[in-house]
Image: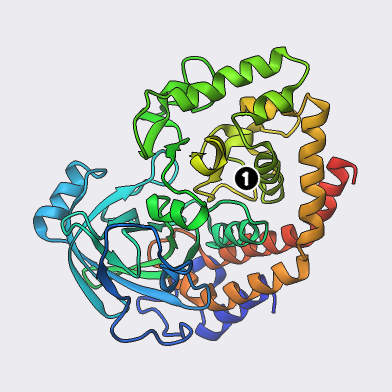
C-alpha cells in the first residue's frame, strides 16, 4: 500500500475532493490499534530516576496505536496560557481513561511551531508540578508535538525510528489523539522529555549536566543560535545537573580553539567531546536530512556531559520537524554552520570519521524494513490525518508529503553513497 494512493482511496470512500481538506464536520471513526487498558497508565510516587525499567514510559510511545489524551483547562488556566504561554498553570488530564488531577501544563514552540491555546499548540505536561514525586508510567513529564510545519505528520516518527536503529541518543515518540475539554485538537506526537529520567535510561551515569542547545529567542525574529564559540558557549541553558558556571561548555570552546590550531584536531577534541558519538550523530543527521539540527544550523540539540565518560560531552538530537529537507535555507554539508562540524569537514581524520560512520549506518539500515515501518504508520494515521480539524493541510498535501518521504527512504542510501564516495 502506497501513501498517496491510500489518501486518494480514502477521499473516494467519503466522497470529497482532494482540495477540500477536512472530510466534513464529523471525523470518521477508524480503528486506532489495540484498545488501551481502561485504567490507563500507572500513577506512582517515586523520587529517584535510578533503578527504573528500561521501558518506563513505553505506553506513551507505541507506534501502532493512538494514546487518547484529554486536557481540561480551568477558566483561570486558559486565561493564564493566553497571558503567559510558557509558564506552567494547573490543569487536569485524562490519558487512556485514567484521570490525573492537578498537573502543570504550558505551551511550547517558538518561531516555526508555536500556536496559541485555541489553535493547535505544542504542549508540555508536567505530572509532578503540583504533586512532588508523582510519576505516570514512570515519567515526570510528557511533551506533545503539533507537527504544524509537517503536512505528512510522519517526519519525527521516521527520524526517531532511524535514530533508534542507529543507537544514537534521541527521544522516543508515538502518536496521540488530543482533545481539549472534549473538543478535538487532532493528531499529535507524544515525545519523551529529555530530563533526569531520560538520562538515567540512556547513560550509565545520568547525574551529569544537560544543556539546551536550541536558540535563545528574544521575540519576533530575534534570536541567538548556540555553539561552542566565544561569547556563545556560556549562554547554554542548564536543564539538568549542577551549575558550574559553564565551565564544561566553555571547556569545549577552549578545546575547539586549541584543536583548530593544533596538528591533532580529533585527539584534542576527543579529550572533552566524544568524537565517535559525534560521527554517528552526524551520519544520522545527514541520512534524515536534519536541516535544523547542530550540524547544519546549530539548533535543536542537547549537550550532555557524562560523568561515566570522564565528563566528555555528547550531542543529543531534539525536535525533528524540519528533518527530511535537503539543502533548505541554503545549508549544505560542505559548509555546515556548527563550528565543530565545519572544522571536522576540513580535517582529514575527522572527515573520514564521519564518512566511516555513514558507511556503517548504510550497512545497518535496511530501506525495505524502514519502508515497511513507514507503511504501518501511514495505514494507522492516514484517515485521522485528513480529518484533523487543525492541521491546515488538505488530503493532497498529506499524500504528496508522505509520498516524498517514501521516496526519501528508497533513495537516501544512494544519495549518501554518492556524496561520501562510498
Coordinates of residue 359 in the picture (x, y in percent): 82, 50
Judge left or right: residue 61 versus residue 134. Answer: right
Residue 177 at x, y percent in the picture: 38, 71
Q: Residue furthest top?
A: 261
Which residue sits at x=20%, y=54%? Answer: 129
Q: Can you say which quadrant of the picture contains the N terminus?
A: bottom right
Q: Secondary structure at mark 1?
A: loop
Q: Is residue 87 left or right of residue 24?
A: left
From what the image shows, is residue 254 above or below residue 66? Answer: above
- Quarter occupied by residue 369: bottom right
On the image, the x and y values in percent for residue 59 come to: 42, 74
In the rendering, at what x and y percent does residue 270 appear? 66, 31
Q: Is residue 121 visible?
A: no
Total marks placed = 1
In the displayed structure image, the side of residue 317 where residue 287 appears, left or right: right
Is residue 287 visible in this depiction of the protein? yes
Q: Nearer the viewer, residue 271 or 180?
A: 271
Q: How is the image coloured?
A: rainbow
Give the residue at the far right of this rendering. Answer: 421
Query: In percent of the image, x 73 and y 14: which residue is there?
Result: 262
Q: Label 1 crowding class (10 Å Cα cut-off): few <14, some 14-19, many 20+?
A: many
Of residues 112 and 132, the one nearer the viewer is: 132
Q: Which residue is mark 1?
A: 290
Relative to 295, say whether 189 is above or below. below
Tell me which residue sits at (54%, 74%) in the image: 382
Q: Residue at x 79, y 25 (%)?
A: 347
Against 291, is 125 above or below? Answer: below
Amino acid at each position: 500500500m502506497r501513501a498517496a494512493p491510500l489518501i486518494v482511496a480514502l477521499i473516494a470512500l467519503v466522497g470529497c475532493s482532494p482540495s477540500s481538506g477536512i472530510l466534513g464536520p464529523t471525523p470518521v471513526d477508524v480503528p486506532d490499534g489495540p484498545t488501551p487498558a481502561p485504567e490507563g497508565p500507572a500513577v506512582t510516587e517515586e523520587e529517584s530516576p535510578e533503578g527504573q525499567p528500561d521501558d518506563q514510559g513505553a505506553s506513551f510511545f507505541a507506534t501502532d496505536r493512538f494514546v487518547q489524551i484529554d486536557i481540561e483547562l480551568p477558566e483561570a488556566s486558559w486565561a493564564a496560557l493566553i497571558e503567559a504561554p510558557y509558564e506552567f498553570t494547573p490543569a487536569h488530564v485524562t490519558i487512556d481513561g485514567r484521570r490525573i488531577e492537578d498537573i502543570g501544563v504550558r505551551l511550547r514552540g517558538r518561531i516555526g511551531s508555536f500556536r496559541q491555546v485555541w489553535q493547535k499548540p505544542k504542549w508540555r505536561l508536567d505530572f509532578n508540578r503540583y504533586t512532588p514525586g508523582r510519576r505516570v508510567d514512570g515519567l515526570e513529564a510528557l511533551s506533545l508535538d503539533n507537527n504544524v510545519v509537517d503536512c505528512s505528520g510522519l517526519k519525527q516518527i521516521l527520524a526517531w525510528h532511524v535514530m533508534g536503529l542507529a543507537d544514537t541518543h534521541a527521544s522516543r515518540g508515538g502518536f496521540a489523539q488530543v482533545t481539549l475539554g472534549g473538543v478535538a485538537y487532532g493528531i499529535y506526537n507524544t515525545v519523551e522529555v529529555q530530563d533526569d529520567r531520560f538520562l538515567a535510561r540512556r547513560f550509565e551515569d545520568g547525574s551529569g549536566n544537560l544543556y539546551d542547545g536550541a536558540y535563545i529567542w528574544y521575540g519576533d525574529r530575534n534570536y541567538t543560535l548556540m555553539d561552542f564559540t566565544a561569547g556563545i558557549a556560556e549562554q547554554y541553558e542548564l536543564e539538568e545537573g549542577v551549575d558550574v558556571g559553564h565551565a564544561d561548555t566553555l571547556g569545549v570552546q577552549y578545546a575547539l580553539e586549541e584543536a583548530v590550531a593544533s596538528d591533532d584536531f580529533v585527539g584534542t577534541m576527543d579529550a572533552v567531546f566524544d568524537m565517535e558519538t559525534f560521527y554517528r550523530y552526524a551520519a544520522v543527521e545527514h541520512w534524515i536530512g536534519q536541516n535544523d539540527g547542530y550540524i547544519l544550523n546549530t539548533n535543536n540539540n542537547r549537550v550532555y556531559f557524562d560523568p561515566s565518560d570522564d565528563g566528555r560531552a555528547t550531542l543529543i538530537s531534539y525536535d525533528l520537524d524540519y528533518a527530511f529537507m535537503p539543502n533548505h535555507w541554503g545549508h549544505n554539508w560542505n559548509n555546515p554552520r556548527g563550528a565543530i562540524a565545519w572544522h571536522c569537514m576540513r580535517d582529514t581524520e575527522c572527515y573520514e570519521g564521519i564518512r566511516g560512520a555513514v558507511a556503517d549506518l548504510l550497512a545497518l539500515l535496511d530501506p525495505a524494513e524502514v519502508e515497511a515501518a513507514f507503511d504501518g504508520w501511514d495505514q494507522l494515521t492516514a484517515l485521522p490525518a485528513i480529518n484533523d480539524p487543525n492541521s491546515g493541510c488538505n488530503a493532497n498535501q498529506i499524500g504528496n508529503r508522505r509520498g516524498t518521504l517514501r521516496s526519501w527512504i528508497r533513495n537516501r542510501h544512494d544519495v549518501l553513497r554518492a556524496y561520501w564516495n562510498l
